[in-house]
Image (spheres, rainbow, N blue to C red):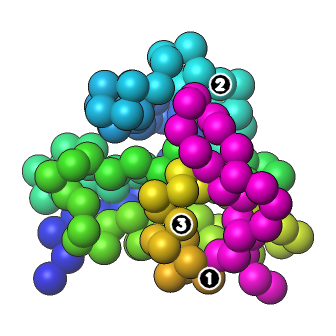
Amino acid sequence: MKNYQLIKTSWQENREALSQIRQKVFIEEQKVPEKLEWDEYDKTSLHILALNHHQQPIATGRIKPDGQIGRMAVLKEYRHQGIGSQIIKALIEYARQQGYPNIYLHAQTSAIPFYKHSGFTEYGNEFLDANIPHQSMRLAK
C-alpha cells in the first residue's frame, strides 16, 4: 500500500516544502553549492511534491517548460520505495499532456539505471555539474 501522495504544484504554492527537500538532499547531503541549487526555472516549472501520510514533504521533481526534468530528490529514509519512479512517471505524463516534443534530463551518473528503467537513453558525453558527473538522457518517443 502506498503511504504517500503526489501533488502537482508550483514554486509559488509550495516553495517552503520543495526547497526543504532539495536543501537536505542536494546542499547538505551532496554538497551542491547553494548558489547553484536555486535558479529562475523554479518559478516557471511544474513541480511534483510527495507527502508522507503525515503530510510532510519527502520527495520532489520538476519539469521546465522546455521538457527538461530535473531537481529529482527523495529524502534518504524514503528511497528505494518507488517514490522517485512515481514522480518521474507523473512528470512524463504531464509533459505528454502538454505536448512537449522532447523530454530530457541531465542525470547524475549514479542515477542512470534509475532513469533507464523509466525509458530514458543516454546521449552525448559525460560532464560535470556542481562537481558531480552527469549524463544527458532523453525519453524514447
Instruction: Answer with left or right where residue 28 lies relative to residue 49.
Output: left
Question: Within the image, what quadrant is residue 99 found in?
Answer: bottom right
Query: What SS does tag 2 mark?
Result: loop
Residue drawn at (47%, 26%) of the image = 32
* Residue 17 placement (x, y as % from top left): 34, 34
The image's mark for residue 39 is 2
The CA distance from mark 3 to mark 2 is: 24 Å
- Using a 10 Å C-alpha cutoff, classify the residue at mark 2 as few (fewer than 14 neighbours), some (14 to 19) or many (20 or more): few
- Was residue 127 drawn as part of the magenta stretch in this picture? yes
The image's mark for residue 119 is 1
- Using a 10 Å C-alpha cutoff, classify the residue at mark 3 as few (fewer than 14 neighbours), some (14 to 19) or many (20 or more): some
Discs 3/2, front: 3
* Residue 67 placement (x, y as % from top left): 77, 58
Discs 2/1, front: 1
Per the rendered image, the range of residues in magenta is 120-141
The CA distance from mark 2 to mark 1 is: 27 Å
Q: Dividing the image into 4 quarters, which one contains the C terminus?
A: bottom right
Q: Dividing the image into 4 quarters, which one contains the N terminus?
A: bottom left
Residue drawn at (75%, 83%) of the image = 140
Whether residues under marks 2 and 1 lie with C-beta atoms below 8 angstroms apart, the answer is: no
96 vs 48: above or below: below
- Was residue 140 drawn as part of the magenta stretch in this picture? yes
Residue type of the residue flagged with mark 3: Ile
The image's mark for residue 29 is none
